[in-house]
Structures are given as structure tokens and as C-alpha cells.
Image (cartoon, rainbow, N blue to C red):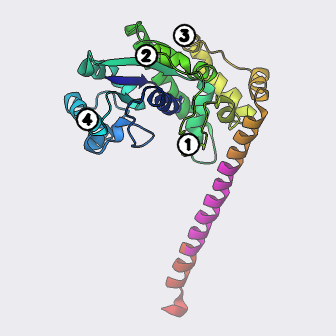
Amino acid sequence: MFYFVIGPNNSGTTVVCQYLAAQTGAYLPPFGHNEGQFAPAVRDMMRLDPWNAKAPIDWAFVRREWESLLRDSGKTAFVEGSPPNLLRADAMLEAFAPDYRAMFLIANPYMSVASNLKNYAVPPLGRAQMDTAVADWLRKAQRMRENARRWPDIPLVRYEDFCIDPSIVAHAFGFDGSARARVAGKKTTGAREIRDMTVRNMAFLKPVEADALSDRLAPHVDLLEFFGYDLLDANGFADQLSAAPDLADQGRATRAGWARRQAVTAAVRWGRKQAMGWRSAWRGSPADA
């Protein structure tokens, strides 16, 4: 049996997969952030162009390799939540039918976009990087909506609801599970318990950036509403942060450290530029000819 958690990156797939493995005793890949796509035998194929929906994947080969890992583990179920799977759910589910159960997972767009910027953007944060992050979320969320409509029998779970009651994921897969659970968490967070990290990620954004994010999401309000989310104005954003002050402080501290990297990078670049100028001046000096 294969348990598939299908959802975008930075939307809670890692913690949900860890919860599933803890509750069922299933095999959880130890690669990447517990992702089957990083298994050595399939990595070159699945990571060649992972976010290109047209990139070829030999799912029969992938299944054989994952089944081999499962046999070696001595377990009977495999938990898989590699985010790029959301772009090719049709081919994956066909290849593993009927030996799978699945759920769709989505998270608050403010959290997901902020998390993407924190992890992948380079200081300083400007309009172009915000546009890229929002476009990335929209593309993945639109495909998630298509998936949910195509497979209405596969449960759709929101990350925030899972954090309130983790057992809803167990129920989505058809078994009883505990509402309380400890997980390994991502190495980058250090969290060992299931807690909604939406506020910590949102607090990475400055209020003016949150407003800019809302402006970019506004033309797609129907997509947000499909998943049960609202556009936030300045007051709504502030209310979200005030709901968990400790997490908001952590998010602001993360942003401060992220911004310090900008200063260090700028200083290094300045130093290299000056060094190159000095070398050029030395080489071109008549006195040294």
C-alpha cells in the first residue's frame, strides 16, 4: 500500500507524512525532507526537471524502486509526499492503482508565499521576486484545484485544520489516529510537535509586503475561496500575527537574519570589486611596465 500526500512545497507535506508514518508504522523515505523523489535510484529522473509537468517520468520504474525500498524496510506501506507529484497526479495514481490511498493538502497562500520567499529569494526582497513567488503559488494552487475537481473522492485537507486536529489526516486515509502526536519535523525548523506555523511564516513579511501580496492575489479570489481562504487587508494581517505573538517574534527574527545576509553579501561583493579594481590599476601602471 502507498499513502500519497499530494500538495505544494512549503504547505506542510513533510509534517503530514511524518504524522502518517508515526501513526501507521509505514515506511517513510529518509531522503530529502522524507521524499521518495530523492531516493537514489529515481533521483536523476524525478529531479531532472521536477516542476515541468511535461518532463517524462517512468512511473513503472519508480514503482519498482519504491517497492524495493519498502521490502527492504520490512514494512507494508510507503508514505510519499514529494511536492512535484501534484503536477502529474494522474500518471502517478494510474501507475499505483489500486494499491494506494491519497489525500490533497493545501495551506494558506500568505504562509506558502512567505515561506517560499524566505527559503528561495535573495535579499533585498523586491517586486520581481514577489511576482515570481505569487505566480509559483498560483500555478500550483490552480493545479491543486484541478486535481480536487477531478478526484472528488480524494479528501482535501488544509494544513491549518490538520494542525488543529491531526486525526483528520488519519480519517482521510481511513484509519483511526491520535489527535496528539510528536514528529521529527524539518531540520530547518527544529519543531518536534505539530503546531500551525502559519504566523511564523507570515511574520517574515513586512506589512507593506503583505499588502502587495494581497494586491497580487486579488484577481484570483475565486481560487482562494475554493480552498476556504480570504484576502487580508492590513488589519486582517495584524490580527493573524497577534494570534500567536511568540511565532510572530520568531518570524520577524528570521527576517532580520535574512536581511543581515544582504549586508554581508553586499560587503563581499564590494570587496571583490575593489580588489579587482586595485589589480587592474596595478597591472596598468606605467611605473610597473
Q: Which amino acid does label 2 sit on?
A: Phe
Q: Is residue 261 magenta?
A: yes
Viewer-closest of 259 and 160 = 160
Query: Can you tell which of label 3 and label 2 is closer to the viewer?
Result: 2
Query: Can you tell which of label 4 and label 3 is closer to the viewer?
Result: 4
Element assignment for label 4: helix
Rendered image quadrant of residue 40: top left
- The residue to which callout 2 is attached is 173
Q: Residues within 10 Å of mark 3 (few under 14, many from 20)?
A: few
Q: Which amino acid does label 3 sit on?
A: Phe
> Quick check: 110 left or right of 73?
right
Q: Which amino acid does label 4 sit on?
A: Arg
Q: What residue type is labelled 1?
A: Asn
Q: How far apart are marks 3 and 1 (CA)?
A: 27 Å
Element assignment for label 2: loop
Region of the chain picked out in magenta, as a range: 257-275
